[in-house]
Structure formats: structure tokens, C-alpha cells
Image (tube, helix red, strand yellow):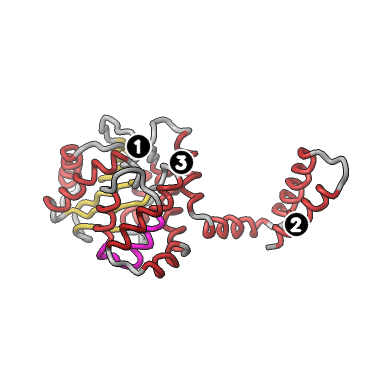
Amino acid sequence: MKVWKAIGAAILVAVASPGVQAQDQRGQVEAVVKDYLASHPDELGEIVKNYFISHPEAVGQILAAILKSRPGALGKATDGTAIDRSAAIASRSTVLFDSPHQVTLGDPNGDVTLVEFFDYNCGYCRRALGDTLRLLKDDPRLKIVLKEYPVLGPGSAAAARVAIAARMQAPSKYLSFHQALLQTPGPVSEAKALDVARGLGLDMDLLARDMASAEVVATIEETVKLGAALGVTGTPSYVVGGNLLVGAVGLSALKARIAATRAAHPK
């Protein structure tokens, strides 16, 4: 791209000039980039987009850095207090409940929807898996939406890419993949996620191609923006009705919130 040529030219000029200090070199490069982007504003979006397509793990890393600066530690359960997010949820209902990038379990036309933000390296998410499976079994009217939210480092981001590619290739096998990966002992990595996919008989060549696709970037980017807008500061986090619950609040708390939502909005 033109901007990279401009950066390269600036670096060559800087390093070829005798007596120029490193700080001055960086200043020259920054000035060239700043001037170029100011005169070519439309190209900035393409640069960012192309970078994240080539390096989708960066989305999760950036999100983790942002969330670490917010109140509440990542992955730590709270007391289960519901936080009113009704206005934010209502304004983002389509992307929250009916996005083409999400995983939907249970009744797709359920009278109540439970959305879970999760990370494969989150110990609390592993414990909460049993709650999700029990809800699927006990509540046939419930719609459950799973959102990949890889906030716990590069291993989480890599696992999310494999998971999204698995969903793209074999939606019917996603729950088996999800369950097996969350039950894998130790830190989750790309290698472990690929082993799970291989064990389920997925086409590994197709999986590799899908992992590098724009769909993977779009899925993670969408959830990152959504989580930030709703104030999701840890995993697991749940959206039920107009409320956000942060942490592994437990089966009883989830059932109570689902029942309250049904009572408030009977169909």
C-alpha cells in the first residue's frame, strides 16, 4: 500500500542521514505517517482492516488490555448482582440476539434468550459449562447464544479462531467442540483447539483456510464492540432480558433471571 511505501522512504532517509539519533528517526517516520494519513483519511480504515485480517489475534489482545484498565478483574466471579443494561441492550438487540456470526443453541425461536460471553481459558467459564448444558436440557423454550470473547491472551484468541472456523465448517459439531475444548485440562492453545477439531473429524485444510478468513475477524470484532458497549468486563458474562450478569453466577441465579424475564414478557 502507498502508506507503507511512505514509511519505508522515511526510514531510508532517516538511517541514511549521519548523526541522526533514534528519537529523531522515529520523529521523522511519525511525521510522514501522520501527514500521509491526514491527506488520505479513507486509507486508514483499510490499513486497520487488512492488519486485523492478517493478525486476528491482535483483536483479543487489544480488548484484554482495555478491559484490564476497567474495574473488575477478568475472569473473576462477582456476587451475581444483575446490572441494568436495558437501554444498551435494546439499541443493539439484533447484533446481540440474531447476529449471523453467533452460535445459537436450544430453541432458535425461544421465548427467552440467554447470551453468554466466554473465553476458552477462563476457569469460571469451564465451571459454568455445566450450567449451560443443564439449561439446554431443562428448558426447551430457551434460546442460548454463545459469543466468543477471547480476553485472556493469545492462546484464547487462537482458540477462538479455531472455534469460529469449526462453526463455519460444521455447525452441528460446534457444541461438541465447545464442550471438549472447555474440558481440556491446562491452558488452551491453538494446538489444543486443533487437536479437538481433528478428533471430531473436521477437514483440517478447510479449517486452516477458514481460520484466516474475514469471517473470523468479523466475528471477534463484532463481539469486542458489543462487549465494550454493554460493559462486559469479565467472563463468563450473561445477558438475560435487559440485564447483565458478570461472573459464574450459578445455575440457580440464571434460572431465576430467566423466570423473571418470562414473567415480565409473557408470550
- Where 80 falls versus 209 (above or below)? above
- Tell me the residue that label 2 is attached to: 6
Q: Amino acid at mark 1?
A: Gly
Q: Nearer the viewer, residue 259 or 34?
A: 34
Q: Is residue 157 left or right of residue 141?
A: right
Residue, x 43% and y 50% (percent of image)? 157
Q: Secondary structure at mark 1?
A: loop
Label 1 neighbour load within 10 Å: few <14, some 14-19, many 20+: many
Q: Position of residue 185 (x, y in %)?
A: 29, 45
Q: Quadrant of residue 237?
A: top left
Q: Amino acid at mark 3?
A: Ala
Any mark on residue 75, and which? 1
Q: Position of residue 180 (x, y in %)?
A: 26, 53
- By secondary structure, the bulk of the magenta-drawn segment is best described as helix
Q: Is residue 103 visible?
A: yes
Mark with earlier residue (1, 3) = 3
- The magenta stretch is 160-173
- Tell me the residue that label 3 is attached to: 64
Any mark on residue 54, and which? none
